[in-house]
Image: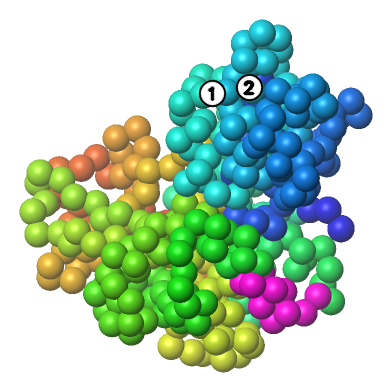
Amino acid sequence: MYYQRTLSTILENANNTFPVVLITGPRQVGKTTILEHNLSLNRQYITLDDPQIRSLANTDPSLFFQTYEPPILIDEIQYAPELFPYIKMIVDRKKQKGLFWLTGSQQFHLMKNITESLAGRVAILNLQGLSQCEKLQRKSETFTTELKKIKLQMNVKEIYEYILRGSFPALFADKNMSWKLFYDSYLKTYIERNIRSILNVSSEHDFLKFLCIIAARTGQLINYSEVSKEVRVSVNTVKSWISVLETSGLIYLLQPYSSNYISRTVKTPKLYFLDTGLCCYLSGWETVETLSNGAMSGAILETYVFSEIIKSYWHNGKSLKIYFYRDLAKREIDFLIEENDTFYPIEVKKTASPVPNDVKNFSILEDAKLNIGKGAVICFSNNSIPLDKDVNIIPVPSL
């Protein structure tokens, strides 16, 4: 079963505006599928996962483009950076829209080549796994703290089922697919194809241990030294591994908000996994019951909400300025979205009945002399209603 992706509309607009369209994101989130679903009949599909085609692309780019003429779709373009200058020459010569569709799962290789060769010629779109709206086949809009009129009832168990299942399309296209087998295979493929080709990982066991340790810390401040001691590798190694996970689109490092008016805030980012299913698998949570009642239930809910907010922007082709607030007195605001110099504070609570005290830290922002918009508390409430005049209650199912 194909799930309609929000990005499809953005893809169509980008194809009519730019000569090159690049979709980046982790492996198996549907980058190739969304392009193939919109593939015109006269466009060839070429994958650089094929060793022979990859070799031709790297050793003789000119012959490659004589063999495969645009318009074409090139999958996993990061494997042949030598193609970028030739793509630029073809684009500048033909001056046509939609000549090249590219996918890439390793942004750390791609962006340098893109900025050097294709600046101003390429639309870069970011795709993650299925959003909650896409799973429910509902129209997706950019997240807002304003009230939504969505009549959708989901109980706590159903929400944690979505959290545990994760967001990879394959797990929803085939409901009989083994969750555990999928993630076990995904990790092996990820390490084999991405990590070994980029990092000199001397011990696969150490890297897997590292993944499990940081998964258990999703939604928390990342302490590199602490992780270093547990994995028994250097701090620089931990930082390098985290950087690769971030640029692979598997995790997100959320930066703390600070300003000249706030001097006692933390400087350390918070780490979030962008697929909660992978995070649960690495953390050892394998059933809805143990997850929803376990020690990570609050953190994994916050992680889920964060990933849904992120996807609501990225899948609509928009960038997002989002932070968190935490000061040395441990007063914290989960998320701060900045739009048009206005800050929208968001709190995530594992409750169905939030109270004003749950958002008491929102008042801190007044001291920072910020322009504050409508706040929100995202929770298990069944109703989208005001909490007070400045804060709305947003049910998780309405994300």
Direction from residue 315 to residue 353 in the image, left or right: left
Region rendered in magenta:
177-188
Vertical position of residue 371 compared to residue 282: above or below? above
Name, please, the residue furthest toward the front. Answer: 59
Q: Provide the residue designation for mark 1.
A: 118
User: What's the distance in space between the residues labelled 1 and 2, CA to CA?
Assistant: 10 Å
Residue 210 falls inside the magenta stretch: no
Residue ID at (33%, 82%):
232
| Whether residue 216 can be seen here | no
User: Which residue lies under the disc numbered 2?
Assistant: 86
SS category of the residue bearing label 1: loop
For disc 1, the neighbor class at 10 Å (few under 14, some 14 to 19, many from 20) is: many
- Residue type beneath disc 1: Leu
Query: Label 2 sits on what residue type?
Result: Tyr
Count numbered badges in the picture.
2
Q: Kindly report which numbered mark, 1 or 2, lies closer to the viewer in this rendering.
A: 2
Residue 338 figure quarter: top left
Vertical relation: 277 (above or below) 24:
below
